Amino acid sequence: MTQFKAFLIEEAEDGVTSGFKNIDTDDLDPGEVLIKTAYSSVNFKDALAATGAGKVIRRFPCVGGIDLSGVVVESSSDDFKVGQEVIATSYDIGVAHHGGYAEYCRIPAKWVVPMPNGLDLFSSMALGTAGFTAGLAVERMEHNGLNPSAGPVVVNGATGGVGGIAIDILAALGYDVTAMTGKPEQAGYLKDLGANEVLDIASIDLTKIRPLGRETWAGVVDNLGGDILSWMASTVKVGGAIASIGLASSFKFNTTVMPFILRGVTLAGIDSVNAEMAVRRKVWRRLATDMKPRNLDKIVTTVAFDELPATFDLVMQAKMRGRSVVKISD
Ligand SMILES: NC(=O)c1ccc[n+]([C@@H]2O[C@H](COP(=O)([O-])OP(=O)(O)OC[C@H]3O[C@@H](n4cnc5c(N)ncnc54)[C@H](OP(=O)(O)O)[C@@H]3O)[C@@H](O)[C@H]2O)c1
């Protein structure tokens, strides 16, 4: 039995409370693999869970953190050996099963991804769920026929985690990328990541969205939902694809069938949580090779374990740029 520090989210009368507590390995959930956590990260979902701003936690109490990288310290699975470096994201981790904000995490072997060659404990968490989701979105759009000669790809929520990594991946693959942002003062940063153009969201008149607007985008990476997604759907080129990832602006989506039936536009839902393991491993392998972002150092800030609550506040106030990796243990 080993005592260690964990960031625990608990149920309270008026919502949730969260903070640091000491727990021990007997408190952990069942699973074949015990991992000593090296790094975790902060995703939008982690901030929603810890602050109670979103009903994310499905089992209380729960150690937060939907992502983790670390080293296997115990394993009853033939697939994983003691000393092996691994990644675990999604499934119930950090929402209904104790997650990555703790020095140890025990999870089922079927949720664990071996560290691919080309990534390490830190870079895999610089990517985390945000990077995996961006990779999954690109993979889905390519499956739909997207290629660099098809035309420009627009990425919104560009200064966020998913957005920044999507820009970096697409630019590395040779796409002409437009970054759409509510922070036009970050244009220099977005161009450094690989964006050719930066579009200020405020320049778009969302009161005048036509069923079919000017054909502009071969691909869309949408982190926002709401009227921005409606506008983008009306401006996708014939045969183009939208990867619907997030709801940072709104979960609502008002549109017409016109882009879908007159331009053959595909609306691809991106679900990182339920992605099959074969797809998961493929995307992680690509993130370590042809999709490997070239500018993670510009996107990522490392925060100490103790800085988690302050980081959640920045995310909820949309003041964060890029991603935060959380150093959990040496
Ligand atoms: N489907 C999945 O499996 C999956 C996986 C991961 C994430 N997500 C979702 O994808 C979205 C992005 O995640 P993330 O981790 O990248 O979040 P993030 O780092 O917090 O970034 C979100 C970005 O969206 C923009 N934004 C935030 N609030 C906004 C608002 N009220 N109106 C308009 N724009 C706003 C900001 O970018 P700008 O200022 O540059 O515009 C912000 O940086 C979230 O909704 C998240 O829940 C889904």
Image (cartoon, rainbow, N blue to C red):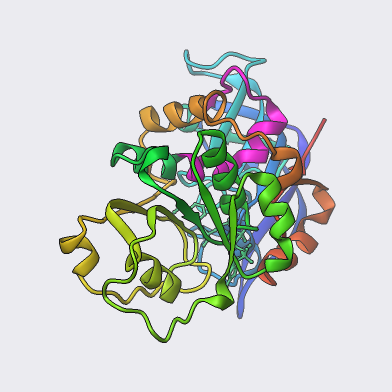
Q: Which residue: 38% across, 38% down?
A: 147
Q: Position of residue 61 (x, y in %)?
A: 60, 57
Tally of numbered tags: 0
Considering the image in quadrants, where does the C terminus appear?
Answer: top right
Residue 40 relative to residue 310: left or right: left
Considering the image in quadrants, where does the N terminus appear?
Answer: top right
Closer to us: 23 or 179: 179
Q: Position of residue 278 (x, y in %)?
A: 37, 27
Q: Is residue 20 above or below residue 54?
A: above
Q: Which residue: 39% across, 56% down?
A: 217
Ligand 1 quadrant assignment: bottom right
Q: Which residue: 63% across, 49% down?
A: 65
- Residue 215 in sight in this render: yes
| Magenta residues (range) | 113-135
Say if the magenta span includes residue 125.
yes
Q: Is residue 65 above or below residue 278?
A: below
- Residue 130 in sight in this render: no
Residue 62 relative to residue 274: left or right: right
Residue 256 relative to residue 233: left or right: left
Q: Residue furthest bottom?
A: 207
Say if the magenta span includes residue 219.
no
Residue 45, quarter of picture: bottom right
Q: Which residue: 64% across, 43% down?
A: 100
Q: Position of residue 329 (x, y in %)?
A: 80, 35
Q: Position of residue 192 (x, y in %)?
A: 71, 46
Q: Residue furthest left?
A: 261
Q: Is residue 121 above or below residue 265?
A: above
Residue 136 relative to residue 101: left or right: left
Name the chief secondary structure element in magenta: helix
